[in-house]
Amino acid sequence: AQSVAQPEDQVNVAEGNPLTVKCTYSVSGNPYLFWYVQYPNRGLQFLLKYITGDNLVKGSYGFEAEFNKSQTSFHLKKPSALVSDSALYFCAVRGTGFQKLVFGTGTRLLVSP
Amino acid sequence: NAGVTQTPKFRVLKTGQSMTLLCAQDMNHEYMYWYRQDPGMGLRLIHYSVGEGTTAKGEVPDGYNVSRLKKQNFLLGLESAAPSQTSVYFCASTYAGNNQPQHFGDGTRLSIL
């Protein structure tokens, strides 16, 4: 069975500091990994994905994520946080041959000025 | 290009009433999904469709029915609404294939009294 864990309900960071939002996964076969962001009263927006290849994936708004197969992790990172990055972030995984995406419970990111 | 459009945006129902939520996408996507989002539980898949005329059960299908008579539309029905179905409902669509990101609508906020 596929599963995703986001161990932190909330991450607090000061503007200008680096941020990390953690995600670990469990899936049979090769994983397809995704990060989405949700702003208040909006749907989820795609940020980036890992399918194969380089372990460091770059996405929208300066975000990147590092795939680590041995630790089954896909942490989201940004070198310098902005107040406007404050939102709810979801990690998701899909296994080979599955049409369904499994989401984590979400991590709220709060960036203080 | 509207993307994924959900109607209505808000609705209040009484227990036992029925209603249909409409999702329309203009991206010619093969796959469509209905999720519900509840605090602390992330997104849970209700039903999904991999093509016109096909539907399948997701993680939490009880109390819901769906239909996909046209490729661009995916309808979610509540036959007899219950307070436990109070939630925010999201529709998503994507091209076929495991490496494709899902595109989300902005949600329908449904309260059952």
Image (cartoon, grey):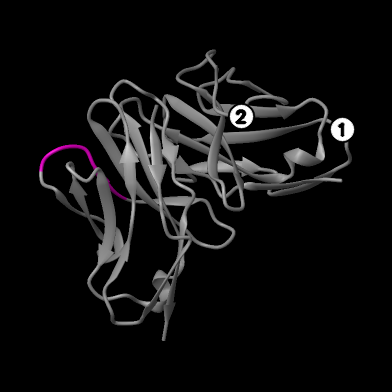
Query: Which residue is label 1 attached to?
Result: B17
| Of the pair B91 and A37, the residue shown nearer to us | A37
Q: Amino acid at mark 2?
A: Val
Task: Output the chain of dot 2.
Answer: B
Q: Residues within 10 Å of mark 1 (few under 14, many from 20)?
A: few
- The lab-note entry on whether marks 1 and 2 share a chain reads yes
For the residues bearing labels 1 and 2, Cβ distance under 8 angstroms: no
- The quadrant of the picture occupied by the N terminus of chain B is top left
- Specify few, some or many for label 2: CA neighbours under 10 Å numbering under 14, 14-19, or 20 or more: few
Local SS, label 2: loop
Q: Position of residue B90 (x, y in %)?
A: 57, 42
Q: Which residues are magenta?
A: A48-53
Q: Earlier in the sequence, mark 1 or mark 2?
A: 1
The residue mark sitting in front, 1 or 2, is 2
Residue at figure coordinates x 43%, y 60% from the top left: A8
Q: Is residue A90 above or below residue B94?
A: below
Apparent side of residue A59 relative to residue B6 in the rendered image (left or right): left
Q: How many marks?
A: 2
Residue extending furthest toward the top:
B53
- Image location of residue B27, percent across then percent down: 42, 35
Q: Which element is circle 1 on?
A: loop
Residue under label 2: B60
Subunit of mark 1? B
Which amino acid type is marked by label 1? Gln
Q: Give the residue at x 42% y 24%.
A: B30
